[in-house]
Amino acid sequence: MTDDLHAGPAPEPAPRPHGPDELSALAAPRRLSVDDHMFTAPGLPGTFRLQLFTADGARPVAVAIQVAGAEGTSLMNGAETFAGAVWERHCPEQDQPPVWVERQLWPQGPLEETCFQRVMFDGGDRYRPRGPKWSVITHEQLQDLVGAQVAKDRGAGYVPRAAEPPSRRNRSWCSPSSWWPALLGPARSVSRRACRPGCPGGAACCVRYCRAAAPGRVAGTTAATGTGSTRWPSRSSGEPARKA
């Protein structure tokens, strides 16, 4: 029975898909064919700047830039839908979604500290990519990829959204400038999906964010929302959460 065993060294693991070799294989001179400063996807309340770079025989590259917390659904939370909408609207003849790169500008910190991230999808149906994974790509790598200049800002055509009136389910805990930066640090340092202003999930959504970012720090709030509480415990007085 031992005759069937492989006597040589164990095979090496497959290379990671985010390496520089893949970017080099995708690199080609492209031109800026779309620069939409207020791109929207059907059925999703969110906007961003879309720069689409195309060339004959080369896979399109889409660069999405958004002011985080100010444009509805974030690029992270809507990655699959946004990429699918660009794919269907601007390059429907392609068998794959465009190479997707995004940048979220955090208004509460220096904009130059934010970075571009490439999003790779595990699979999906036509115009419906799924399974996004993020990895950092530098501005220089991005420009090498498209062979052209790539704008880093939101663009002069950006129109800020009107402020939404506060509601019972839209309080300070769902704002990037409220309590959780003091607890977890600036939002831009967290690579996982985060709650957005106006989030319909309310406190429970924020608990999901906190659990992903710092599991050991939100045991009390997790328990509170699990019992139907609509108010966070007071961190200063130890007051228990009130139930609805």
Image (cartoon, helix red, strand yellow):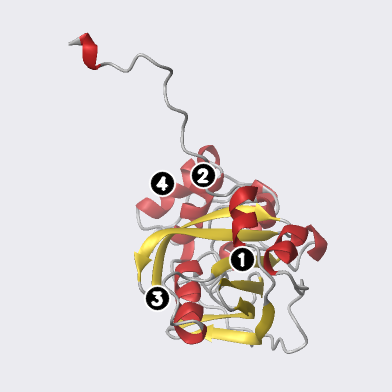
The answer to whether residue 6 is left or right of residue 62 is left
Give the spatial CA distance, label 2 vs label 3: 37 Å
Residue 186, image quadrant: bottom right
Q: Position of residue 61 (x, y in %)?
A: 60, 71
**Residue at (47%, 38%) from the top-left corner?**
14
- Residue on which the image places disc 2: 218
Q: Which mark is residue 101?
A: 1
- Residue nearest the observer in this picture, 161 or 63: 63
- Residue on which the image places disc 3: 127
**Residue at (41%, 67%) from the top-left corner?**
129
The answer to whether residue 124 is left or right of residue 165 is left
Q: Amino acid at mark 3?
A: Tyr
Q: Amino acid at mark 1?
A: Val
- Taking 100 as reference, is 10 above or below it? above
- Residue on which the image places disc 4: 223
Q: Nearer the viewer, mark 2 or mark 4?
A: 2
Q: Amino acid at mark 2?
A: Val
Give the spatial CA distance, label 1 vs label 2: 32 Å
Give the spatial CA distance, label 4 vs label 1: 37 Å
